[in-house]
Amino acid sequence: MIKRQITSRLSDAIRNSPAVALLGPRQVGKTTLAFEMGKNFQALYLDLESEQDQAKLSQPELYLADHMDKLVILDEVHRAPGLFPVLRGLIDRGRRAGRKSGQYLLLGSASVELLKQSGETLVGRVVYLELSPFNILETDAPRMDLLWLRGGFPDSLLAGDAALSLRWRRDFIRTYLERDIPQFGPRIATETLRRFWGMLAHHQGGILNAAQFARNLGVDAKTVANYMDFLVDLMLVRRLLPWHANLGKRLIRSPKVYVRDSGLVHALLGIPDKETLLGHPVVGASWECFVIENLLACALNGLKGYFYRTSGGAEIDLLLSWPDGTLWAIEIKRSLNPKIEKGFHIACEDLSPTRKFVVYPGNERYRIHQDVEAIPLLSLVQEIVASGG
């Protein structure tokens, strides 16, 4: 089993909080990680998609009160919103009895819905963590291209061959569209959402233009915004927000949007192997978003990601903002001989970042300008982690 980067944080959260919510898209490994964690805490596991486990919770307060001495893992807990007031009462009862941690581990696949349901009742009692697909720290550098091509979902990355991996991703997309998404929210036409998801893949890393998407889909801009919110909520799409600063310049204020898992992008575009990917127009955008997602997935301690762009052409692909206000500027190039463009220098003059990097697919780290380093992705991830990110 590949050790997940979040394991120690999850263990610490369970030991220090009565409830922990572990969020992540379906098939990302939440249940596997929860089972591994449960071995250390002699946990009780309940799957709220199972009719048998649902029957056990027909009188949830009575059932859970009999297991106050254990960590209880509740999988797909967003399916039982009425359970949260019961958990609050049991947590408070446990606190009065002297137990202040390790009562409930909540697993969910819809972040906003779970945050809303739990936030209304478990405020001050729950810690939230997100489990992303495998990142470069959890695999290894020689497998980076495989991780980029197949994405980080365990069953896709670890498939026996490329055909099996692609088939799994296509099945995953179809299952989400036909079974999972209708369960999470209001009825959305499967084919319309499939087209929208495909458009996002073609538009990977582009500035969101809801009006253009609406015209292409034959719907209004508000409907497109709802679709976008829905996929973001399911942790399948990321909105990378623009950096706002009072610089007296005209800034791009719409977010960048991209499908978070590169393997799903390639499946949506029918890209079966690396050779096809390298000849596809999406290759540069796919690599850029793969780098951004890995950097953000590995940044665990309050590090925020933005992009910066002005109407005059100044641009930074990824701007990392540290909790103390420090900024790191990151340019991303799919070239073994990366060049810095004028727009990056102008943007750095605007923002004065303390560190400047160009991420490229090579293996060496070297200086390409007085204060700019070319750096492999793995090295930058390790730099961020070592700096407290």
Image: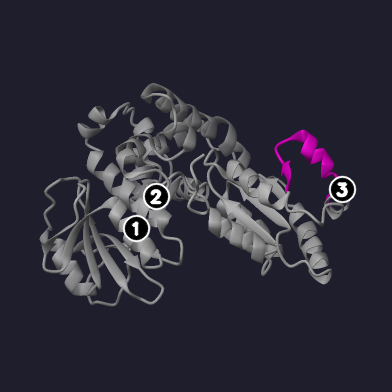
Q: Which residue is mark 3?
A: 59
- The earlier-in-sequence mark between 2 and 1 is 2
**Residue 254 appears in view:** no
Q: Is residue 292 above or below residue 181?
A: below
**Residue 4 appears in view:** yes
Q: Secondary structure at mark 3?
A: loop
- Image quarter (top left, top right, bottom left or bottom right) of the C terminus: bottom left
Residue nearer the viewer, 129 or 174: 129
- The earlier-in-sequence mark between 1 and 3 is 3
Q: Which residue is mark 1?
A: 382
Amino acid type, residue under disc 1 in the picture: Gln
Amino acid type, residue under disc 3 in the picture: Gln
- Residue range corresponding to the magenta coloring: 43-60
Which residue is located at x 32 percent, y 41 percent? 144
Q: Secondary structure at mark 1?
A: helix
Q: Which residue is mark 2?
A: 137
What is the x, y in percent for residue 161?
A: 39, 24
